[in-house]
Amino acid sequence: MAKEKIAPFEGFPKELPDFLWGIALNNEKPWFEARRDIYERCLHGPVKALAWQVMENLTDRFPKLTLMPHISRIYRDARTLNGRGPLNDHMWFSLGRTGRVYAPEPQFYFGVEARCCDWGLGYWNVDAALLERWRRSIDANPQKLSRIVRRIHRMDGFQLIAEPYKKPKGDPGPLLYDWYNARHPGVGKTLWHEPDPPGPELADIITEDFAALMPLYEYFLSLGD
């Protein structure tokens, strides 16, 4: 993907929560199209700027790192509406090696909605073979992941975000038990809009968190090698 010229991230406008609540309450194309300028100014523009700034910050810090952005769309896929309105009342981006959100690879992510924003690291798509390699890697060297998990426990606000198997796959001990038995291993944190959405400092905060999660990202990558 050719590099675009993107304005620096300047924070989310105070009007963002009201706009997103408006989508939730008026989920119709005519309502949205009449307010597309607000969408560009409050949501799409800032999310795009944040994605590119964080990506560039990380690649400056880790020169061998290859990251490509994927930014979600405001319109839902018509095949998955299931009686819902056509608009998403949130927006997110991911950063991965291919920029393809459903690729079976680890991805950094950020999302924003009316009440909060969240970010972290995980998988959008993971198959049984990769999860089997995940468990074999823990069996072979539990200390490697243990060191990473202990570091994440020291990070402010981060926690494991993973759906567990109904029937556990094994027991590597209390520190790694939930990780070992996760269907989609990943970590994340939430920042509530109190009282307003975050400002320009958010780009540096996310960059620092993603940099601190880099050992887990590299561990995930090694599972695909």
Image (cartoon, rainbow, N blue to C red):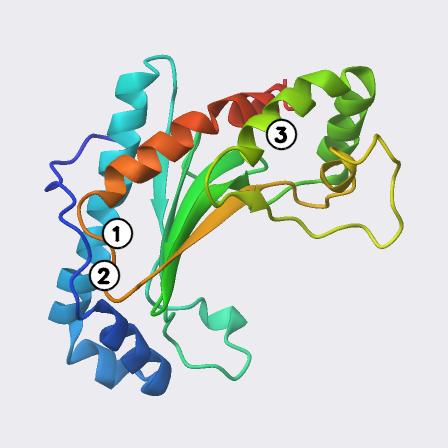
Which amino acid type is marked by label 1?
Val
Q: Earlier in the sequence, mark 3 or mark 2?
A: 2
Q: Which residue is mark 2?
A: 43
Residue 77 point in image, percent of width and height: 45, 66
Image position, residue 184 (x, y; %): 66, 44
Q: Residue at position x 26%, y 35% from top? A: 204
> Please, is residue 188 above or below residue 83 in the view?
above
Which mark is drawn over residue 149?
A: 3
6 on left or right of 145: left
* Rendered location of residue 223, percent (x, y): 66, 23
Residue at image location 78% in from the left, 42% down from the top: 181
**Residues at discs 1 and 2 in contact (Cβ within 8 Å):** yes
Tell me the crowding category of disc 3: few under 14, some 14 to 19, or many 20 or more residues within 10 angstroms, Cα based.
Answer: many
- Residue nearest the viewer, comparing 124 with 189: 189
Query: Where's the N terminus, which quadrant?
Result: top left
Residue at image location 23% in from the left, 84% down from the top? 31
Closest to the camera, between mark 3 and mark 2, is 3
Residue type for callout 2: Leu
Mark 2 neighbour density, 10 Å: few (under 14) some (14–19) many (20 or more): many
Quadrant (top left/top right/bottom left/bottom right) for the C terminus: top right
Pair 1/3: label in front: 3
Element on which disc 2 rests: helix
On the rendered structure, is 143 left or right of 28?
A: right
Q: CA distance from mark 1 to mark 3?
A: 29 Å
| 1 and 3 marks in contact (CB < 8 Å) | no
Quarter of the rendering containing residue 176: top right
Q: Evaluate if marks 3 and 2 touch, with contact meaning CB atoms under 8 Å apart.
A: no
Mark 3 falls on what kind of element? helix
Q: Which residue is under mark 1? A: 47
> How far apart are labels 3 and 2 at the CA level?
33 Å
Q: Position of residue 130 (x, y in %)?
A: 71, 32
